[in-house]
Image (spheres, rainbow, N blue to C red):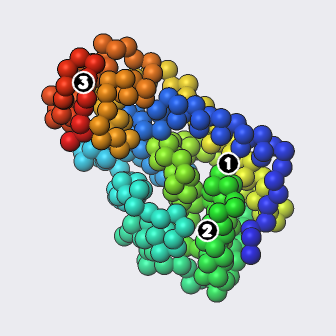
Amino acid sequence: MKPPYDITARILKLISSVSEKIGEVNASYLNKQSPQLRKQNKIRTIHSSLQIEGNTLTEDQVTAVIENKKVAGPKKDILEVLNAVKVYDQLENFVAYNENSFLKAHRLLMQNLIDNPGKYRSKGVGIVKGATMAHVAPPATNVRELMKNLFTYLKNEEELPLIKSCVFHYETEFIHPFMDGNGRMGRLWQTVILMKTYPVFEFLPFETLISETQDKYYKALAQSDTAGKSTLFIEYMLEVINNSLGELLNYKNRTFTDLDRLEYFIKTGVKEFSRKDYMNVFKDISTATASRDLQKGVGLKHFKKTGTLNKTKYLVK
């Protein structure tokens, strides 16, 4: 059964805007960000996603934990960060449309934090906000079937990944398949779904904008619950994604070093190329810069140089 939602004019407008920005990201070779920017964004992602769930560590403390430095803080909060690092370090290994992969990610994320991590709940749960019961999740006996249906929906190739990722995020919150870690898994798996089609999402910290707009996040979830469909949550998440891509494109201090360019170029999979081929990828650098890059690549033994002058070719080792 397909999860219920409507395609509104606002959703179509946001999808168009997101698609345009993804095109700009790819054209600017930001889909493979510099190592420093990737590290910063991973830290922001982990910090923001855990902060939403009540983790008290600051971004600096999260950085220290990632760098294996001693941190004074609640043991549980530190363990949450360590587990999240293990998961985000393995993002490329998770299979978006595989339920067992989803359960493995939850097991890593919640190891030593709850009983039976990586297993669906066997008890009823509700979400309390203040003195009010904000959401009563479906009975535990329904969870396996609901999640099976959700993964069947994910495999439908006719649905846009941008829509599917938002729907999966919402439905995970609604079904609440685990005793704990549902919010973290909803946000994590949205990233896994998106990066399958758009590599930039591996290191795009849209969780930061969710953290900054938590009231809107929970309101969109609640309104979608009341409406019986995820339309309003899809609109909210697409706006978050759109704004996150905008921030990436407007990142004023981004600089791409020769090493960044060489790393990116090698990942394109080319085996033999000329300086002109190299400059066709990096259209904003001069011939002198390209020559220096390639000389460094030879010195680092990334390439083997053959020929001279306009006959020069480079072979990727």
Amino acid type, callout 3: Thr
Query: Mark 1 and mark 2: span between their CA atoms?
Result: 21 Å
The C terminus is located in which quarter? top left
179 to 289, vertically: above or below: below
144 to 270, vertically: above or below: below
Could you say which disc has been placed on residue 237 in the image?
Answer: 1
Amino acid type, callout 2: Lys
- Residue neighbourhood size for the residue with mark 3, other residues' Cα within 10 Å, grouped as few (<14), some (14–19), many (≥20): few
Query: Mark 2 and mark 3: span between their CA atoms?
Result: 47 Å
Q: Residue at x 44, y 66 (%)?
A: 105
Instruction: Identify residue for label 3.
Output: 312
Query: Mark 1 and mark 3: span between their CA atoms?
Result: 49 Å
Instruction: Identify residue for label 2.
Output: 155
Determine whether label 2 and label 3 are within 8 Å by CB: no
Q: Residue at x 59, y 38 (%)?
A: 22
Task: Choose top left, top right, bottom left or bottom right for residue 211.
Answer: top right
